[in-house]
């Protein structure tokens, strides 16, 4: 009972943090891009600026809040792209000719060894640096891992005795998927989604820290850390807080479950 209560607390906390992060895309105490407080730059916490002012005179709480929202939004977009590509490849591998299936498996086996950073740099040869380009790089880069995991989940559930029993009893198509396959796939898919979201957030922030996000003023946790690294000794919290916030986001998602 206590374990269930603790889990409910973590699930509620994770959901609240995601909602709080996304709220930063619509509301912040000050304009995150306006250099309205240059006379205070850089400075520590104060009643008017709870987390201080960065080196360019911008309210740091506003930038950090919006940056957290962008990290969550871009990571979620990369996660959806990864799942979509992996699901399409799995469908092709399972339903297509054997030669095509072998080719897909071989391609995904090779793609596992290709780092997301390389994919990002390769895409930037053809695309302008932007948040969308990073989402595309991370989504494609994680597809091979997601495909291999989805394939294992699918084969394990598809070959289970209860699924075969359902087929013997006449269950087919959507009915078979809804009542025999999906309930048993759901927990594994949610666990995979949490892992892929964490991977996406780390990779996106890493690429943004390297300056591959394009707009140097864009608010994302990795880019905020990069923008303030020159103030590490003068105002260390400008560097420490983005990293701590990213770690807190990943920790709460890791400890959550989000399934019945």
Image: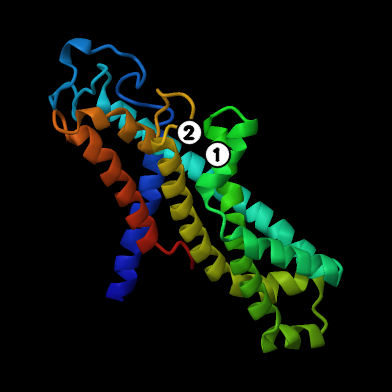
- Give neighbour class at mark 2: few <14, some 14-19, many 20+ (Cα, 10 Å): many
Residue 206 drawn above or below residue 172 = above
Label 2 vs label 1, nearer the camera = 1
Q: Is residue 22 visible?
A: no
Return the disc, 2 or 1, that comes first in the chain's sequence.
1
Q: Residue at x 87, y 68 (%)?
A: 97
Residue of label 1 = 121
**221 left or right, relative to 120:** left
Q: Residue at x 70, y 61 (%)?
A: 107
Outermost residue to the right: 97
Depth order, front residue of 41/109: 109
**Total number of numbered discs in the rendering:** 2
Q: Are marks 2 and 1 in contact (CB under 8 Å)?
A: yes
Residue 70 drawn above or below residue 171 = above
Q: Secondary structure at mark 2?
A: loop
Q: Residue at x 40, y 51 (%)?
A: 15
**120 left or right, relative to 232:** right
Residue 124 drawn above or below residue 157 = above
Residue 72 numbered tag: none
Percent x, y for residue 190?
52, 63
Residue of label 2 = 212
Depth order, front residue of 9/254: 254
């Amino acid at each position: 009972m206590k374990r269930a209560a603790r889990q409910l607390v973590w699930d509620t906390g994770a959901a609240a943090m995601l909602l709080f992060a996304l709220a930063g895309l619509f509301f912040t105490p000050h304009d995150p891009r306006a250099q309205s407080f240059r006379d205070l730059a850089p400075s520590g916490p104060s009643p008017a600026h709870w987390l201080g002012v960065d080196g360019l005179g911008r309210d740091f709480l506003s930038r950090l809040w919006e940056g957290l929202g962008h990290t969550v939004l871009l990571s979620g977009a990369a996660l959806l792209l990864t799942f979509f590509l992996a699901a399409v490849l799995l469908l092709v591998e399972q339903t297509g000719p054997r030669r095509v299936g072998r080719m897909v498996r071989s391609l995904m086996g090779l793609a596992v060894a290709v780092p997301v950073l390389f994919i990002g740099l390769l895409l930037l040869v053809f695309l302008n640096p932007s948040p969308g380009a990073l989402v595309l790089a991370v989504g494609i880069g994680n597809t091979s891992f997601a495909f291999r995991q989805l394939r294992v989940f699918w084969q394990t559930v598809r070959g289970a005795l209860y699924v075969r029993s359902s087929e013997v009893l006449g269950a087919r198509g959507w009915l078979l998927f809804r009542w025999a396959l999906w309930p048993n796939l759901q927990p594994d898919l949610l666990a995979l989604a949490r892992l892929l979201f964490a991977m996406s957030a780390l990779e996106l922030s890493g690429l943004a820290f390297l300056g591959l996000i394009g707009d140097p003023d864009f608010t994302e946790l990795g880019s905020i850390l990069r923008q303030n690294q020159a103030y590490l000794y003068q105002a260390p919290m400008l560097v420490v807080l983005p990293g701590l916030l990213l770690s807190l986001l990943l920790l709460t998602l890791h400890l959550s479950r989000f399934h019945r």
